[in-house]
Amino acid sequence: MRAQLDFLLREALAEITANHGPLDPGDLAPQIERTRDARHGDFTSNVAMRLAKKLSLKPRDLAADLIAALPDSPLVEATEIAGPGFINFRLIPGAYQEELRVILEDGPSYGCSETGAGHRIIVEYVSANPTGPLHVGHGRHAAYGASLANLLRATGHEVHEEYYVNDAGRQMDILAASVWLRYAQHLGHEVPFPGNCYQGGYVIEVAEALLREHGEELDGDLAALRQVFADNSADPEKQLDLTIAEIKSILGENGFAVVFDAALTSVLTDIKSDLEDFGVVPQHWYSERSLVDSGAIARTLDLLTTRKMLYTEDGAKWFRASDFGDEKDRVVVRENGATTYFASDIAYHFEKRERGFTHLLDVLGADHHGYIARVRAGLEAMGEQNECLEVRLVQFVTLYRGQQKMQMSTRSGEYVTLRQLREEVGNDAARFFYVSRSNDQHLDFDLELAKSHSNDNPVYYVQYAHARIASMLSRMQEENIVFDGAAGADLTRLTEPEEHGLMVALSRYPEQVHLAAVNRAPQQIAHYLRDTAAAFHACYNAHRVLVDDAQLRDARVSLALATQQVIRNGLTLLGVTAPTTM
RNA sequence: GCGCCCGUAGCUCAGUUGGAUAGAGUGUCGGCCUCCGAAGCCGAAGGUCAGAGGUUCGAAUCCUCUCGGGCGCGCCA
């Protein structure tokens, strides 16, 4: 609907250009918006005010010229100049009635477009270290990333969703060490469990599974390890590194790998099933270790060396990130020869480009904002355009239980898992609540409130509208009321103000999908659905659908069906179900 | 100290990339079920858009500064 008006204005602008001289291409993109006030018509454009100065014309004069240049359209009933130079469009009533038919014909694809066609985009999100179950913060990433991917798909992008698995590095070694210490305790060894090891109960479960599968195979002499623990004055993190080294020497490379893999597999399996139950299914789980194994990291470092982007200082290899806008240079190979996480990151993002993705979209936690400059720098040094990387930061979730602020540290084990949250408030409420807030807004999540007031959650309000319609439709069947479909219905019978309001709301859906995709803002869909449900409830309350007048009834049933379709489409984008009963 | 995000109704938040009289939910108060689901509807009250300057026809939105909050600044990941 809006696209058609866009087209009209574009034609008029072309004619103005011919008469008054050239404009920038950016100026030619017409800005057409919905009006906020019905007295201003249905759509409005501020283009005359924006361009007046450039063309040395008065805004209202330019507006008059534009209106004169507008091609005729069957959609537009009237145009007028208002205020300082707005061009207001009033549509014929039939425009909205026609849109109802489009909704019912297009069905599930109503609202989809091809504006993103030709773009291959990879969306990476969650990517939590597999060192423990997902917590409520990860849930926000999952809900946001998955909805974003849906929106991009709906606008014609070719979308690939990916979870980057940090299955290499120190954190995983700490997890493996934690598991083995629990295992040793189960075997009866008197050995302390340091506070900076992973404290969660799942560590014990992995240790027990290890005991069942491997018996005492992984036992060993703990004398040297006890010496490590004996030094009370040592720095805890250094002591932890020594502990890991000692456990590696006790178990040998293969033995440690058994523990490591058992821990990784267990945690990752849990994460996968948790996300799947949440309706979040990435197409690919990309292993950081595979980057090492495939030689991708080595190739990246070679390329950077060839391009003279690296130098050696204090025994480490540094990347000249500051040459590319980062605030300082960054280490890629440590003094001890190990590559850093950042080296993996460059290789990983470069590899995404090699896989043919034109656009890399990362959804990261707000605490990762320091990365953006350095990963961009890395990509640029590798010969890529740094604009190909887009990062969306998701602000923190602060969890409360009543007034009590809760800790969310994976290592301490004191956190509420995503699974617990889903069990308390349900998937639908959780997904809707997560994406109702803008990603760059902090989110206060009060568990007590979410649980006790779950019926007040806006998601039920929207779902209720859908279920209410379903219920009305089944009643229609029970009473053997015949409905011949919208094609034969006389939609001009929809004359009530509430009906008009609802039709206007429905017709906005395609614009909302497009805008939400462009703005990376699924919350706009959530708010749109709330508004549309409100328009429906108001209408349904004011006017009976199943009336005796068959013509009027058919028109109203058509409107209800279209409403149901739009709500279902919108909820699907957000990963929320559209129930027929509640 | 430097950088990123944020500050909108009592509370939780929207605000269509600079538009016309700043909006919802929740909470408070008052109404509506003999009638398609009351998980609903209608109405009232509630604001110096943190503050001060600036840019222009026009600012919650863009720029500068101040105040307040969150996060980051490692040869950790």
Image (spheres, coloured by chain):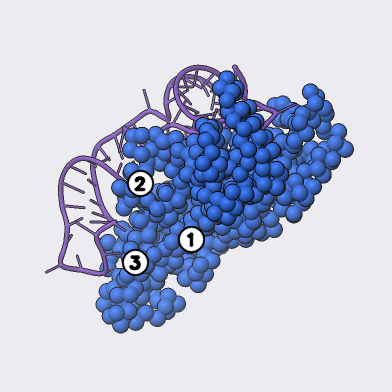
Badge 2: residue crowd in 10 Å (few <14, some 14–19, many ≥20): many
What is the letter of the blue chain? A
SS at circle 3: loop
- The image shows residue A530 at horizontal and vertical percentages of 39, 53
* Among the two numbered marks 1 and 2 on one chain, the one whose residue lies closer to the N terminus: 2
Query: What amino acid type should be assigned to the residue bearing mark 3?
Result: Thr
| Viewer-proximal residue among A456 and A334 | A334
SS at circle 2: helix
Query: What amino acid type should be assigned to the residue bearing mark 2?
Result: Ala
Q: How many marks?
A: 3
Residue A450 bears which disc, if any? 2
Same chain check for tags 1 and 2: yes
* Residue beneath the point at 52% across and 35% down: A190
Q: Which residue is mark 3?
A: A581
* Image position of A276 with respect to A174: above or below: below
For the question of whether residue A182 can be seen, the reply is no
Q: Which residue is mark 1?
A: A572
- The image shows residue A355 at horizontal and vertical percentages of 74, 54
Task: Say which quadrant the C terminus of chain A sits in.
Answer: bottom left
For the question of whether residue A112 can be seen, the reply is yes
* Among the two numbered marks 3 and 1 on one chain, the one whose residue lies closer to the N terminus: 1
What is the letter of the purple chain? B
Badge 1: residue crowd in 10 Å (few <14, some 14–19, many ≥20): some
SS at circle 1: helix
For the residues carrying marks 1 and 2, which lies nearer the camera in this image? 2
Tell me how far mark 1 sits from mark 2, CA to CA. Answer: 22 Å
* Residue beneath the point at 33% across and 50% down: A454
* Image position of A73 with respect to B48: above or below: below
- The image shows residue A213 at horizontal and vertical percentages of 58, 55
